[in-house]
């Protein structure tokens, strides 16, 4: 995972957006993980945001890949609110 990325469950369309917390300290980088589901022609249904250490976010990304999730293109605008 590149600290920026999108990953989606192809069965349910549940999607996670991984993006840097630009205010985190360099010695302890953090990543936000937003979860939601895109809805065609509407605002996405955004459900949660978690704040993780970069290493934990990387483990989550790899586990999602292992269980069948797939990297995908952006599913909503970055300014969408949780």
Image (spheres, helix red, strand yellow):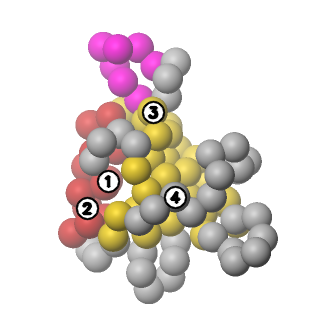
In the shown orientation, is residue 6 left or right of residue 67? right
For disc 4, the marked residue is 74
The answer to whether one can see residue 16 in this image is no
Per the rendered image, the range of residues in magenta is: 24-30
Residue 39, horizontal then vertical, whole percent: 69, 75
For disc 2, the marked residue is 63
- State how far apart marks 1 and 3 are (Cα): 15 Å
The answer to whether one can see residue 63 in this image is yes
Q: Earlier in the sequence, mark 4 or mark 1?
A: 1
- State how far apart marks 3 and 2 are (Cα): 19 Å
Tag 1 and tag 3, C-beta contact below 8 Å: no
> Residue sitting at 42 percent across and 81 percent down?
10
For disc 3, the marked residue is 20
Q: Earlier in the sequence, mark 2 or mark 4?
A: 2
Single out the residue that lies furthest toward the bottom: 11
Residue 82, horizontal then vertical, whole percent: 70, 50
- State how far apart marks 4 and 1 are (Cα): 18 Å
3 vs 4, front mark = 4
**Residue 35 versus residue 1 in the image, above or below:** below
> Residue sitting at 61 percent across and 70 percent down?
37
Tag 1 and tag 2, C-beta contact below 8 Å: yes
Tag 3 and tag 2, C-beta contact below 8 Å: no
Circle 3: element type:
strand
* Mark 2 crowdedness (10 Å alpha carbons): few <14, some 14-19, many ≥20: few
Query: Which numbered marker is on residue 60?
Result: 1
């Amino acid at each position: 995972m590149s600290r920026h990325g999108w990953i989606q469950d192809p069965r349910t369309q549940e999607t996670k957006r991984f993006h840097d917390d630009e205010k985190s300290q360099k010695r302890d980088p953090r990543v936000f993980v937003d979860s939601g589901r895109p809805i065609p022609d509407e605002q996405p249904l955004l459900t949660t945001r978690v704040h993780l250490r970069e290493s934990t976010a990387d483990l989550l990304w790899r586990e999602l890949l292992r269980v069948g999730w797939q990297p995908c293109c952006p599913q909503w605008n970055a300014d969408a609110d949780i």
